[in-house]
Image (spheres, rainbow, N blue to C red):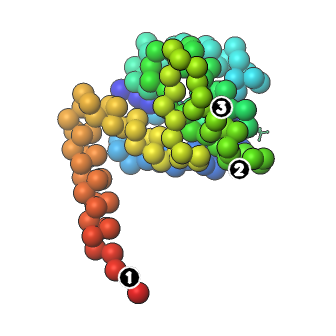
Amino acid sequence: MKIGVVMGSTSDWGVMKAATETLAQFGVESETKVLSAHRTPAELEAWVGGLRDRGFAAVIAAAGGAAHLAGVVAAFTTLPVIGVPIKARALEGIDSLLSMVQMPSGIPVAVVAIDGAKNAALLAVEILAVTDPSLKEKMDAFRKQQADKVLASTLD
Ligand code: RP5
């Protein structure tokens, strides 16, 4: 199954590259789009609405400012939506974080840290790994590699 990655602007790509790179590292196919909840609402609805039938399992949605993109994506699908608040030019990204994390009851968005693109991808891989044993093995290996690095670290 595939993961959709959508961001509100090309200016989000510098952060969001880490999500597509991480998905690729696990061999997970993804489709990346620049679509905006306020600038291209019709095109966003059309893309999100077709994802389940096209074999997608989850969507990562990234935006900055009044970041309603993830909530709007979640409104158009019952696939899991992972929101990445982008640190935009004002307010250090707090506006993005709050607008994603404070979704009203009934339409959930799983929100990662500000600029947390890598964790969004890892969470998407974990969702796929629930039903994909080979991905679970890769995730276990990733965790072990990470742990080994900490345990081998030394202080000057
Ligand atoms: C949001 O506004 C985008 O997701 C971006 O983070 C922010 C600024 O967009 P640009 O003005 O750089 O296109 O919609």
Looking at the image, residue 95 sits to the left or right of residue 16; the answer is: right
In terms of sequence position, does the residue under pointer 1 or pointer 3 come before the other?
A: 3
The kind of residue tagged 3 is Ser
**What residue did someone put label 3 on?**
99
**What residue did someone put label 1 on?**
155
State which quadrant residue 70 falls in.
top right
x and y, in percent, of residue 34 in the image: 65, 32
Residue appearing at x 38%, y 82% in the figure: 155
In terms of sequence position, does the residue under pointer 2 or pointer 1 come before the other?
A: 2
x and y, in percent, of residue 138 in the image: 26, 46
x and y, in percent, of residue 78 in the image: 46, 15
Residue appearing at x 59%, y 47% in the figure: 115
Residue appearing at x 34%, y 31% in the figure: 127
Looking at the image, residue 61 sits to the left or right of residue 148; the answer is: right
Residue 14 in the image: above or below residue 77: below
The kind of residue tagged 2 is Glu
Q: Is residue 119 visible?
A: yes
Kindly state the secondary structure of the residue where label 3 is placed: helix
Give the tally of numbered discs.
Answer: 3
Looking at the image, residue 82 sits to the left or right of residue 47; the answer is: left
Residue 45 in the image: above or below residue 143: above
x and y, in percent, of residue 31 in the image: 51, 31
Label pair 2/1, CB-CB below 8 angstroms: no
**What residue did someone put label 2 on?**
92
The kind of residue tagged 1 is Leu
